[in-house]
């Protein structure tokens, strides 16, 4: 039985990973008190003690706007720590799966990004995640870097939960329609990771960067409307929901600039590992059924 070390178990993806990976081996999922990503010695000791065959790193600094005012901390958690994790993985011969983001791109493209496209992040968060990709690639031969897009779940802070709350609290919401991406349920990332780890020997043969997100894409406005429609249907209550009106990113500024287009092609991971993600719309209803309405 292989030993899997999971980092970031309290995050959106990490929480789902803890459930999805348990059947695959002996799962070690340390808490923050047991492994401090700001402390290199803590990272090294935890990995040495676990003696993992596989490390799955879903930890990091994920608050995009906060990274603008805390760039050093974002860089420490998203770049320095992954580099140390990768060094330890290489030393003990473990496979490393590391989660990154499509925010490494500038969003100026208007067709799905491929792994061959050159990153050009527009904010501190994206720069820290790109630095993390490079640190992992340089330090560990047996690695997979998965670039995620528009993650949502029933926990922590995310667009889906924020929209559902605001849609009950306000009569009208203005939602940007010029940001285009692929909403992807954290549970689907966890399930895809479990499928990858079902045959870990194959991961050694094809290391590198892979795009992984739900099939198809939409605007944030359309995503919000789909969420509200599904909750209205599930709850049986049509009244009391906000009307959604379109706006633009320029009219709704954030501390951190956003790439307007982050759609990616999944062809590489489909061709290499047979991983095919579901269509984003098909998963919204399943997600809504997990909520306490």
Image (cartoon, rainbow, N blue to C red):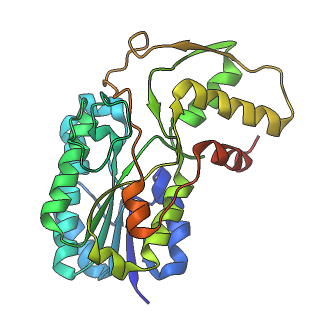
Camera sees residue 39: no
Q: Tell me the quarter of the image containing the N terminus.
A: bottom left
Drawn side of residue 18 relative to residue 260, left or right: right
Q: Is residue 79 above or below residue 33?
A: above
Where is residue 202 shown, x and y percent of the image? 35, 78
Where is residue 209 shown, x and y percent of the image? 28, 57
Q: Residue furthest left?
A: 138
Where is residue 167 shown, x and y percent of the image? 67, 23
Give residue 74's quadrant in the image.
top left
Q: Residue furthest top?
A: 251
Where is residue 32 shown, x and y percent of the image? 36, 59
Give residue 259's quadrant in the image.
top left
Q: Nearer the viewer, residue 286 or 254?
A: 286
Q: How many marks?
A: 0
Q: Is residue 274 above or below residue 3?
A: above
* Residue found at x 51% / y 43%: 156
Camera sees residue 260: yes
Q: Tell me the quarter of the image containing the C terminus.
A: top right
Drawn side of residue 94 relative to residue 163, left or right: left
Drawn side of residue 111 relative to residue 177, left or right: left
Q: Residue furthest bottom?
A: 1
* Residue found at x 39% / y 82%: 3
């Amino acid at each position: 039985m292989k030993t899997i070390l999971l980092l970031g178990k309290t995050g959106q993806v990490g929480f789902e990973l803890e459930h999805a990976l348990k059947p695959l081996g002996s799962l070690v999922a340390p808490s923050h008190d047991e492994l401090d990503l700001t402390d290199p010695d803590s990272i090294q000791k935890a990995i040495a003690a676990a003696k993992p065959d596989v490390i799955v790193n879903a930890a990091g600094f994920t608050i995009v706007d906060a990274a603008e005012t805390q760039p050093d901390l974002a860089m420490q958690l998203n770049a320095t720590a992954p580099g140390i994790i990768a060094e330890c993985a290489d030393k003990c011969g473990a496979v490393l799966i590391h989660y990154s983001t499509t925010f490494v791109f500038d969003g100026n493209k208007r067709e799905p990004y491929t792994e061959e496209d050159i990153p050009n992040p527009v904010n501190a968060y994206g720069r820290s995640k790109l630095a993390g990709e490079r640190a992992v690639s340089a330090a560990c031969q047996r690695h997979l870097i998965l670039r995620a897009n528009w993650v949502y779940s029933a926990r922590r802070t995310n667009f889906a939960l924020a929209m559902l709350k605001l849609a009950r609290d306000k009569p009208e919401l203005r939602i940007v329609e010029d940001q285009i991406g692929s909403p992807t349920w954290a549970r689907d990332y966890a399930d895809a990771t479990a499928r990858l780890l079902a045959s870990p020997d194959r991961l050694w043969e094809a290391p590198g960067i892979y795009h992984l997100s739900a099939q198809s894409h939409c605007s944030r406005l359309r995503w919000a409307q789909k969420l509200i429609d599904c909750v209205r249907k599930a709850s049986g209550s049509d009244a009391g929901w906000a009307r959604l009106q379109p706006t633009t990113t320029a009219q709704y500024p954030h501390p951190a600039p956003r790439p307007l287009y982050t759609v990616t092609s999944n062809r590489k991971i489909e061709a290499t590992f047979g991983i095919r993600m579901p269509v984003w719309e098909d998963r919204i209803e399943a997600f809504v059924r997990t909520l306490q309405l």
